[in-house]
Amino acid sequence: MSPRLAAFASGLRSSSRREPLPRSFILYVSLIVALAAGLVVFLPWTHEWRIHSPSLFVVLSLFVLAGELLPIPVPRRRGLARVTISAAFAFAILLRVGPGPAAVIYVSSSVIADLAARVSATKIVFNAAQYLLALLAAAAVLIAANSLPLPTITGAQLPIVLLSAAAFFATNHVLACVAGALLARVPIVGYLREDLAFQAWTAGCVLAFAPALLASADASVALVPVCFVPMLAVYFGGRQAVISSHRARHDGLTGLANRSSLAEAVQEALENAAREDRAVAVMLLDLDDFKSINDTLGHELGDRVIQQVARRLGHAVAASGADTLLARIGGDEFGVLVRGPQAEAEQVAGRLLAALDQPLEADSVALHLRGSIGVACYPQHGRTAPELMRHADVAMYCAKGSDAGVATYAEEDDEYSIDRLALAAQLRRGIDRGELVVHYQPKMPLHGRASMAVEALVRWNHPQLGCIGPDGFIPLAEQTGIIKLLTERVLEASLEQCRLWRRAGLEVTVSVNVSTRSLVDHDLTVAIGALLARFDLHASALQLEITESRIVADLPRARASLEELRAMGVTIAIDDFGTGYSSLTQLQQLPVDEIKIDRSFVTGMETDRQDAVLVHSIIDLGRNLGLLVTAEGVESENVKQVLAELGCDYAQGFHVGRPAVAEECVRHLRAPRSSEPRPPVISLVK
């Protein structure tokens, strides 16, 4: 057997891609190659060829080459080991013919196999030197015992043959492991001990086969090819075992590593990080609202989308240059192991989100996907694999509620994580069961040019907790990716009710609050267009309200979405105006139709002169910009009258009407308006 360690081979490839080879490794390889070259030049054994059976020599040589070209793959916990049976035939040539012919055949076969596999020149040269020195060590034992060559092998000669085989294995194993340790920058002793039992067992089986080969050849050379048949059976069995192992450790749909592989890799990385004082990061990526794709387009198309996403993420990870492992851990969730610090992990996260930002096409359907990524780092966020995975999961749900799409774990975010996850599952089921109820709060026109309007406010009738207001579950919906489904259900219910009111002769405009995450979703415009067509409504019947502070947080993308919606005819209102620190320049850039003064200013108008002045200024600003103005939090007739005097278009608040179901709200819409306003008592000037 030739211990071409998988870690050595993969380490050589990754090191050449990422960073220069260690100087210690280069020096070591140079030393081994120089030693092997010196032995070839100066030792006379290379010229001593005693081939008494050319046919046997040819047959054994062919099988040395075949063994190098057909290594037996053996699945291992940390990867794939390759057992080459060429060592048995090369050792047989050594025993029967001598070290010179054995070295020439073995080394040339190794070079041919490496060239066929397109491995690096460094590895080709090192493998050749390694094989040569291993054969020399075995030959030295036989020469010392005056047992070379062996025309026949008797029971008395078996101990020296086994000792020679042990020298062959020890030299081969030590040379390869030292190279691998230097390349990976890990302790040499630990690297030598790793998988020693497996290497010794497989090497013993292969090398012990050499005496049996020669015994068969003594009877007839024709029996040697027959001895190769069991090797072929082992070879094909090994290939099947590799296929089965790959299926067990990889995702069948994408070919990526699966959850168990990721968990093992994280555990191994943590062990190395603890020993070498290095950082490790675990990231979880979840596609936002992927369930709607499966529900709408079918699971077959959904699977193809997942495959395309996996390829994009794989390219992004490879392009990052980081030492990473990408895995699909189930459904629309992916995991990434980054063997590096937090900054490197966050850089990889940015590349992953950028890879999802471009539209994806499946069966001529253009899809716009977004993802949320949670990051947890060793050692600050956890010291075990389960702990890091759980904390990355918590961070991921926090990311779903942020505009950035990436969140790093913070301990304060974990306080209610389990309860929140349970409530999120109940919310999704509640949406499907029709537990969401839309209430409507009237917006009273303060003069003739304004039409009737209402704001849709969703409530959740929880079976155990009762009626939950939007503040109790909207943030949760944003954090868990349910906000898209929730927004679509509220839009559907609101527009259906708007159609009923208009058929009854009430020209009502309905306002619906949407989050920034929903606003920048490319599917929102399509969904709104389909609902307007379904209920036979003009786009002006709908107004979307967006919180000012959330727009300012992502102004470029918000502006593009608002322009697209406004082009349809949907009107746009900025909610909670005055609390988001937006500048006049930003307000001019936004394609909006209305601003809604935050209730915190309006409710204080009667007692705080400064609030009254601010409200007056905002109304003047809106009128000068050609915008409608609504004042929220109107709780007295006096405030309503002042707002009317100042030129405000709408009043909204408990004095005008509380949020109510559609049947109760319609009474406010039909109620006659007072035509005799009383003089206001709020003084705006000293």
Image (spheres, rainbow, N blue to C red):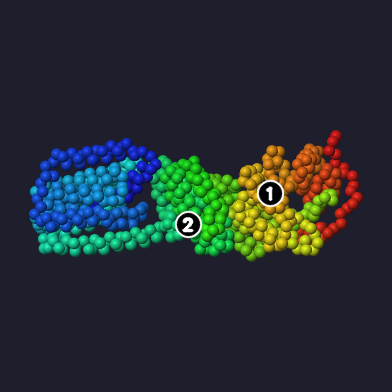
Tell me the residue at 55%/47% (across/down). Answer: 406
Quadrant including the C terminus: top right
Given residues 314 and 200, the one toward you in this image is 314
What label does residue 287 carry, if any? none
Say what secondary structure mark 1 lies in: strand
How far from the left and from the top, in percent, is residue 304?
A: 49, 59
CA–CA distance in space, label 2 to label 1 = 35 Å
Given residues 262 and 607, the one toward you in this image is 262
Say what secondary structure mark 2 lies in: helix
How far from the left and from the top, in percent, is residue 249?
A: 40, 57
What label does residue 307 carry, if any? 2
Residues tagged 2 and 1 counted as in contact (Cβ below 8 A): no
Q: Badge 2, how many Cα within 10 Å: few under 14, some, many 20+?
A: some
Q: Amino acid at mark 1?
A: Ile
What label does residue 546 carry, if any? 1
Q: Amino acid at mark 2?
A: Gln
Q: Is residue 168 left or right of residue 507?
A: left
**Foreground: disc 2 or disc 1:** 2
Tell me the residue at 17%/56% (across/down). Answer: 60
Q: Is residue 149 left or right of residue 408?
A: left
Q: Is residue 305 above or below residue 185?
A: below
| Residue 546 can be seen, yes or no | yes
How far from the left and from the top, in percent, is residue 498?
A: 74, 60
Q: Is residue 25 left or right of residue 574?
A: left
Report which quarter residue 623 is drawn in.
top right
Q: Is residue 167 above or below residue 582?
A: below
| Residue 168 can be seen, yes or no | no
How far from the left and from the top, in percent, is residue 464?
A: 65, 62
Decide which of tag 2 and tag 1 comes sooner along the chain.
2
